[in-house]
Image: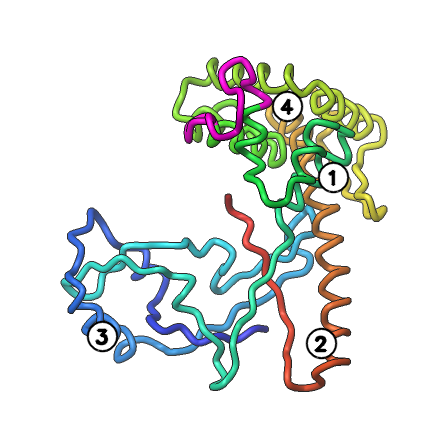
């Protein structure tokens, strides 16, 4: 169990009840803080769940800190205020800080490795560049000659298509994210895979292997069984397992790496700092 102090805290039902905002002026912030701290607990505790996610990633609940939005308009009595929620969480023990670290685009790196896609691997090696701009530039090379020419919409579409492949989005979900019609989303996905054919071949390999073996396997050898991968009587369940097969290999392999890293970091911190450092980790997953 992890503990943190919430500078402005409220039950989730209250925090998420804001409607169309009429933002409070700056001088109201102190009033909001005093209202929150007077009415609600000052500490929150989350549970780390090691086995709840099918892919093997660590999850949290009560509250789910992984789904904490970056910004949110909160309502305290008659005051609406735009709050940077994640910055409100600080260490519970005075004098300590929370250090946040992450592997940059780890699941996309795993995906490019598994697909053996040279173009995507080249993009991931350019650590100081925006990978989604580079991806959009290669995808739409007839429109953009350099990454600087890539429009925000093209970048967002390239990013969302990567997530669609990674998380197994269906056409309706992808259409909603891209704000286009389902048949347009299907055409966009096909166009993207035509530009990166090794990605399409990898997806086919994973689905075929899972269908034959009824399970998928991470790079570390961990197995996830797919009960409906041969269920031709239920097309919805079959399609869901086919998408989950691809997602589980990428996200599961990334989860294994993160856990190995956690163990290594914990040992190093204890060796170098003793009891001065307590180590915990939750990974922010929403895109």
Q: Residue at x 55, y 34 (%)?
A: 132
Q: Nearer the viewer, mark 1 or mark 4?
A: 1
**Depth order, front residue of 144/220:** 144
Q: Of label 1 and label 4, which has the lower sequence position? A: 4
Q: Of label 1 and label 2, which has the lower sequence position? A: 1
Helix, strand or loop at label 3? It is helix
Residue under pointer 3: 35
Q: Of label 4 and label 3, which has the lower sequence position? A: 3
What is the quadrant of residue 11 in the picture? bottom left
Q: Of label 2 and label 3, which has the lower sequence position? A: 3
Residue under pointer 2: 269
Q: Label for residue 165?
A: none
How dense is the environment of label 3, judged by Cα within 10 Å: few (below 14), some, or many (20 and up)? some
Q: Nearer the viewer, mark 4 or mark 3?
A: 3
Measure the alpha-carbon separation of dots 1 and 2. Answer: 30 Å
Q: Please determine whether, in this image, residue 85 is positioned above or below residue 98.
A: above
Residue 74 x/y as whole percent:
27, 59
How dense is the environment of label 4, judged by Cα within 10 Å: few (below 14), some, or many (20 and up)? few
Coloration of the structure image: rainbow
Q: Which residues are magenta?
A: 138-154
């Amino acid at each position: 169990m992890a503990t943190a102090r919430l500078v402005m805290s409220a039950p989730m039902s209250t925090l998420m009840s804001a409607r169309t905002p009429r933002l409070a002026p700056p001088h109201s912030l102190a009033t909001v803080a005093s209202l929150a701290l007077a009415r609600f607990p000052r500490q929150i505790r989350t549970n780390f769940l090691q086995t709840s996610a099918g892919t093997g990633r660590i999850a949290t609940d009560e509250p789910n800190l992984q789904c904490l939005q970056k910004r949110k308009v909160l309502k305290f009595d008659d005051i609406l205020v735009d709050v940077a929620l994640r910055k409100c969480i600080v260490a519970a023990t005075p004098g300590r800080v929370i250090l946040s670290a992450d592997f940059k685009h780890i699941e996309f790196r795993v995906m490019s490795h598994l697909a053996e896609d040279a173009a995507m691997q080249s993009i991931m090696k350019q650590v100081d560049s925006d990978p989604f701009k580079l991806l959009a530039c290669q995808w739409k090379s007839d429109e953009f000659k350099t990454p600087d020419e890539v429009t925000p919409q093209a970048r967002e579409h390239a990013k969302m298509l990567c997530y669609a492949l990674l998380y197994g989005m269906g056409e309706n979900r992808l259409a909603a994210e891209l704000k286009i019609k389902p048949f347009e989303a299907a055409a966009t996905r096909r166009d993207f895979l035509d530009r990166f054919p090794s990605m399409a071949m990898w997806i086919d390999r994973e689905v075929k292997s899972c269908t034959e073996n009824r399970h998928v396997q991470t790079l570390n050898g961990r197995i996830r069984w797919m009960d409906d991968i041969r269920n031709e009587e239920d097309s919805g369940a079959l399609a869901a397992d086919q998408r989950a097969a691809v997602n589980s290999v990428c996200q599961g392999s990334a989860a294994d790496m993160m856990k190995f890293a956690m163990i290594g970091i914990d040992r190093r911190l204890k060796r170098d700092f003793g009891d001065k450092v307590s180590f915990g980790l939750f990974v922010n997953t929403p895109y």
